[in-house]
Amino acid sequence: MLLFRRSGPRSRLLGVLAAVVAGATVVSLTAVPTEANAAPLGCDLPVIGAICAPNTVVLDGRALLGTKIALLAGDPTLRDARSNLLAQAKPELTSGPWSVMDKTQLPPSGDKHDYMSLAPYYWPTQPQTASNPWGCPYVDRDGQLDPIAASISDKPEWTKAYNAIYQLSLAWYYTGDAAYAQRAELDLRTWFLDAATRMNPNLNYAQGIPCKVDGRGIGIIDFSYTLTEVLDAAQLLDDGAPGWSRTDNAGLTSWAGQFLTWLRTSSYGASEAAEQNNHGSFYDMLTAGLALYTGQRSLAKSIVLQSETTRIVTQIQADGEQPLELTRTRSWHYFNFNLVALTRLADIGQHVGVDPWTYTAPDGGTLFGAVNYLIPAATQGQSVWPFTEIDFHQYAALDVLHAAADAGDAQARAALPRVPVEPGGDLFALRPAAEQLDDIETS
């Protein structure tokens, strides 16, 4: 895509900025010629804001900066994407804030600051009565959401909170409108920082099964990739947002460090790390992201490196099939879902000098192969998907195809124009990392 077509002093400046974005994270432009009588340029410009690329965790800060510059240059495709982003972010200016303290139930610890959720696919088998308020015992109905699980507000509220924080922070970054930043900051402080409302940094009571277990290691996937979006949002705000202070940054870094410690030392964390399917992939992605955010680059690098042999080798066959996701009633969803984790893990790897896209397992499995396996159904629909899927959404593959195309996959790039766009528009250009586009909680 040709980003700069106009001529004149500003276009020459934008051309220099685009070239700089490709090769440096933080730049000084004081030696760049400017328009007549203009002040020398530093790290901040009065029109487009910060010239330093944000120090993001999953997202590529240099790519974000390049997009910001291209928007200033008037790129029409990016302007359409920004309009779609703002259409989603504006309602968040008056939504929330949300807190774990909003739930009416008390976790087994007796502390409402502890996050609590129920296993989404487990259903009661008996009527709910005073003596059996949950309707125990519970049975598994894979892929079918138990509405009782939604009665505990922590999970639906963190979903709203994390999504709002991410969208608002992106909206601030691309517009400079302080209102977006200030609302994102309120949501962040409410969920993570303020003593009266903050969540304790553990998931001891995630995806419990009434009358059986208070929590489970696989409940860690409740936070899947969305917590790493919060980390990227915080890094965007730390790139000059009004109101986001060093104290805020230090507080969130401390919370993230404590949560990472819990993930790596608790029995639940150990059990999730041992999972071989998408649960293990998301555990690696989450811990690597937290390690990078908290300044533990060597740990992040080791997690990404290890994932090549513990995830790609065990999960992806030579033809790209993911057999560990085949037993599910939502196989299309989970094929894509696992690739959300693995492609985001590859994004983290780019920050620490590891590229899982180039890794080939001994039997021939690769990330590119797994993404390309999705192309027929992504471009033609469920009729060519050979496995069980009770709620097929063709656009679920769009982001992982984008990720593969960005990594150099010609087949994925050629397929993209034939894949339906998710509701709300394709936002990948503004936040170039895969998301779970078919929200299993609502689809």
Image: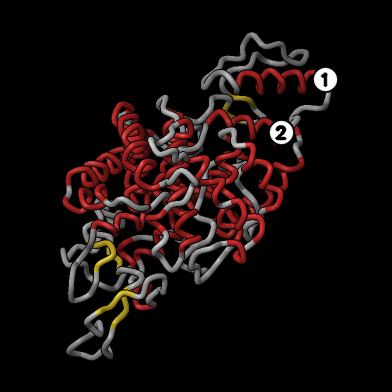
Crowdedness near tag 1: few (<14), some (14–19) or many (≥20) residues, C-alpha within 10 Å: few
Q: Quadrant of the N terminus?
A: top right
Give the class, few, some or many, for how many residues have Cα within 10 Å of label 2's Cα (few <14, many ≥20).
some
The relative height of residue 247 versus residue 329 in the rendered view (above or below) is: above
Query: Residue 168, relative to residue 410: is it above or below?
Result: below
Q: Does the rendering let one see residue 247? A: no
User: Label 1 amino acid?
Assistant: Gly
Q: Position of residue 94 (x, y in %)?
A: 53, 60
In the rendered image, residue 412, in percent from the top left (x then y), is placed at 62, 43
Q: Residue at x 37, y 55 (%)?
A: 324
In this rendering, is residue 128 above or below 98? Answer: below
- Which sits in the foreground, 28 or 248? 28
Type of the residue with mark 2: Leu
* Mark drawn on residue 72: 2
Tell me where residue 65 appears, x and y as whole percent: 59, 30
Left or right: 84 as drawn, with respect to 290: right
Kindly identify the residue that appears in the image at 33 percent across and 50 percent down: 192
At 33% across and 41% down in the image, what residue appears?
Answer: 252
Task: Determine whether 146 is above or below 13 in the image.
Answer: below
Q: Which residue is mark 1?
A: 8
Quadrant in the rendering for residue 73: top right
Q: Is residue 419 left or right of residue 118?
A: right
Q: Name the residue: 59% across, 37% down.
A: 409
325 or 202, nearer to the observer:
325
Distance from disc 1 to disc 2, alpha carbons, whole Å, reads 14 Å
